[in-house]
Image (cartoon, grey):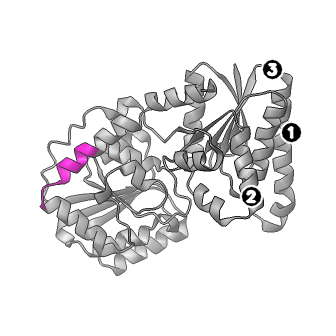
């Protein structure tokens, strides 16, 4: 069976890589593992110039729609997998899902990222209608957030499958450093996109509440030159440059080698559409204890309420770090984090969910 996959995967040169693109690439690989032939029709990216974008982007979306329609129509043994981001895109997504149904093709609608519940309640009745109809017209619905499953049922009466981000089982091997972290220095970590929405300045504020001789923070990732310069200036202003280093993005193997030597993953994201962070899952898989904001799916991923800080108060994050460390609770939380990933966020679990969705279960 052939699957037409519609969603963002990084643009023509594959250089636009965020959580959505990374997750979609994983899904395509899983579909291939399940024996499906996958053809990707990429959701277009709008051109940056506003005046041109207003005219050209609708044309891009229309061309993508025609491509999907043609591919579905010419082959009966074909289905659609749509990686959905709803909100302003819901009307195009509804058209694609509805078209698949009209011509007798099955479809899987995947709700990615956060913001679906807030968008549904805050937008117009027209938006709510098209959102519900997209879900109802899809043969199966899968969703990245555990919170979405009861929400979807409440508005449609339809059962959705929980399809979170995941890691491969080979990364869940026992961490050799878990039993030897007896350092007097607390090793802190942030890795991922270095951007204002990830609250990097706030992470530096947290460090201001920790004794300089008791912690070391490594920030791994990429950002704009201007933003990185502002972060470096702030580090100097706070006089904590001896306790912090910024490392450019690393390849997977080297990144995991770094992660295994850390104690806490600091993730106070204020991203309005925060979904299921890949970085959060990866850190937890290595026994690194996260301290997270209550944005997006953070709480349902961590599954340990004491590791979720509801307020954006740097002192609260610092107090939790010191309390867990000084009360010798770090190992307990570390083991729990590893277990959570092993129980809920592995490739084999995700593969089973995807297989059920594409079998119409």
Q: Secondary structure at mark 2?
A: helix
Q: Nearer the viewer, residue 27 or 247?
A: 27
**Which badge, 1 or 3, comes first in the chain's sequence?**
1
Q: Are marks 2 and 1 in contact (CB under 8 Å)?
A: no
Residue 272: image location, x then y, percent:
55, 64
Answer yes or no: is residue 334 visible.
yes
Q: Is residue 94 left or right of residue 14?
A: right
Quarter of image, res 33:
top right
- For disc 1, the neighbor class at 10 Å (few under 14, some 14 to 19, many from 20) is few
Quadrant into which the C terminus falls? top right
Judging by the rendered image, the residue that carries numbered circle 1 is: 66
Q: Is residue 343 above or below residue 322?
A: above
Judging by the rendered image, the residue that carries numbered circle 3 is: 76
Q: Secondary structure at mark 1?
A: helix
Residue 227: image location, x then y, percent:
51, 69
Residue 357: image location, x then y, percent:
60, 30
Quadrant into which the N terminus falls? top right
Q: Which mark is residue 127?
A: 2
**Which badge, 3 or 2, comes first in the chain's sequence?**
3
Distance from the alpha carbon under mark 2 to that under mark 1: 23 Å
Q: Is residue 111 magenta?
A: no
- The range drawn in magenta is 327-336
Residue 260: image location, x then y, percent:
28, 44
Q: Residue at x 45, y 54 (%)?
A: 192
**Overall secondary structure of the magenta stretch?**
helix
């Amino acid at each position: 069976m052939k699957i037409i996959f519609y969603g963002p995967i990084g643009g023509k040169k594959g250089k636009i890589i965020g959580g959505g693109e990374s997750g979609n690439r994983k899904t395509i690989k899983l579909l291939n593992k399940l024996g499906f032939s996958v053809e990707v029709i990429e959701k277009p990216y709008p051109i940056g110039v506003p005046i041109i974008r207003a005219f050209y982007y609708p044309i891009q979306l229309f061309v993508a729609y025609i491509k999907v329609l043609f591919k579905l129509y010419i082959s009966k043994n074909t289905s659609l997998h749509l990686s959905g981001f709803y909100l302003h895109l819901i009307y195009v997504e509804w058209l694609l899902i509805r078209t698949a149904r009209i011509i007798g093709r099955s479809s899987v609608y995947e709700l990615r990222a956060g913001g679906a519940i807030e968008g549904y309640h805050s937008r117009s009745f027209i938006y709510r209608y098209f959102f519900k109809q997209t879900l109802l017209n899809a043969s199966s619905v899968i969703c990245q957030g555990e919170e979405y499953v009861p929400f979807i049922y409440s508005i449609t009466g339809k059962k959705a499958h929980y399809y979170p981000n995941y890691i491969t089982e080979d990364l869940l091997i026992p961490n050799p450093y878990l039993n030897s972290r007896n350092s007097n220095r607390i090793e802190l970590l942030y890795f991922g996109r270095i951007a204002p929405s990830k609250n990097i300045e706030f992470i530096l504020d947290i460090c201001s509440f920790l004794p300089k001789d008791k912690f070391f923070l490594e920030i791994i990732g990429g950002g704009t030159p201007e933003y990185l310069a502002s972060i470096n200036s702030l580090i100097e202003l706070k006089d904590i440059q001896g306790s912090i280093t910024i490392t450019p993005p690393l390849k997977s193997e080297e990144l995991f080698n770094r992660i295994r030597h850390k104690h806490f993953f600091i993730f106070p994201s204020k991203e309005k559409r925060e979904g299921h962070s890949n970085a959060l899952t990866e850190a937890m898989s290595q026994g690194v204890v996260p301290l997270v904001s209550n944005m997006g799916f953070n709480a349902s991923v961590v599954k340990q309420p004491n590791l979720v800080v509801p307020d954006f108060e740097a002192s609260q994050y610092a107090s939790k770090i010191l309390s867990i460390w000084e009360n010798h609770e770090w190992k307990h939380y570390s083991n729990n984090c590893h277990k959570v990933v092993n129980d809920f966020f592995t490739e084999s679990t995700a593969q089973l969910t995807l297989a059920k969705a594409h079998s119409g279960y």
